[in-house]
Image: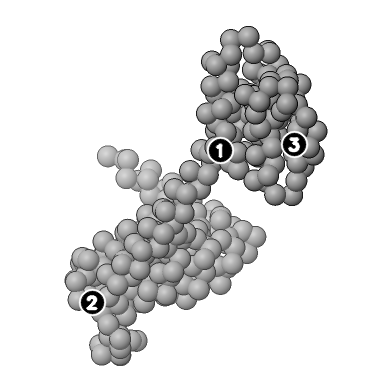
Amino acid sequence: MRSLGPAAKVLVPQLQDRLTDPDVRIQCSAATSLFNVGEPRVRVEAAKVLGKLGFDAIGTKRILKEAPKEDETIDADVRKAAAVAYAAIDEADDADAEAGNRRSRDIERSKNVEFLRLCLFGSDHFACHQAAVALARLGPSAQAAVADLRRTLAGDHLGPGSRAARSAADNFEPDSLDYVDMLARGSAAWALGEIGSAAISAVPELRAALGYRWPDIRASAAKAIGKLGPAAKDAVPELRYALSDPASDVRKAAATSLGLLAPAARAAIVDLQQTAQADIRSQGSARRP
């Protein structure tokens, strides 16, 4: 339009009317044309509209950026308006790119979760352990794997009916399994805790795990329960019992989780005090020659 000279000014009022058009594409086209007219007041108005359009005006970044370079005598207000509009569009561009990256990451994580869920099953206990660790690191993004992690923690990860194939569940002693299987279960408990409130359905398995003879699993289960939040209050009785666990890591985890489950754990305050006092006494005894 600038090449049309004075003739272009006849179109200015019509283009200004289009700055409020419901279609952002028409707004953008009108503002771009007005910015090229040459009248400072109009150019400032046009630049402001482009800035408000943000990402929808992404194609005008070059025009806004190059305008001051093309015309050294450009009005100071126009220069400022162009700079502000360019910054706004550039920020919107970055935000859109970040959103695109997030979408890509979410899709990739979803694919990873599906793969890791498959790795939780089978006779390779170490692969199961590694899959559970990877799911733990994904945190809430791994919530689709909650049911699989529950089965892993309960010992049903070897395949359908694996628990039934063993001796009666009441006679099952977790510490009779090999060490790597126990690692897998502990990692499953950890992953459930890292997923957070979305794993609240795992409370029954975590409560049961507090009774396992393997202290690492008991500690992981105790920590996980606290991370599920107040909705895990049904586990308070088991956590109170765990305050007298022979393993200090389990006692510490239980105490921390009871604090996170307040006010449902108010009844455990006396237990917490007694545990703390007992630990202080035991530490004092250990320091004596």
> 119 or 256: which is nearer to us?
119
- Residue corresponding to mark 3: 15
Residue type of the residue flagged with mark 3: Leu
Q: Dot 1 lies on which element?
A: helix
Q: How many numbered tags mark residues here?
A: 3
At label 1, counting other C-alpha atoms closer than 10 Å, the crowd grade (few under 14, some 14-19, many 20 or more) is some
- The spot of residue 15 in percent (x, y) is 75, 36
Q: CA distance from mark 1 to mark 3?
A: 20 Å
Q: Earlier in the sequence, mark 2 or mark 1?
A: 1
Q: Earlier in the sequence, mark 2 or mark 3?
A: 3
Q: Percent x, y for residue 136?
A: 38, 58
Q: Circle 3 sits in a helix, a strand or a loop, which is it?
A: helix
Q: Is residue 51 above or below residue 285?
A: above
Residue type at mark 2: give it.
Gly
The reply to whether residue 277 is in sight is no
Location of residue 208 with respect to 13 vertically, above or below: below
Q: Which mark is residue 58?
A: 1
Residue closest to the eye, 72 or 88: 72
Q: 201 or 272: nearer the eye?
A: 201
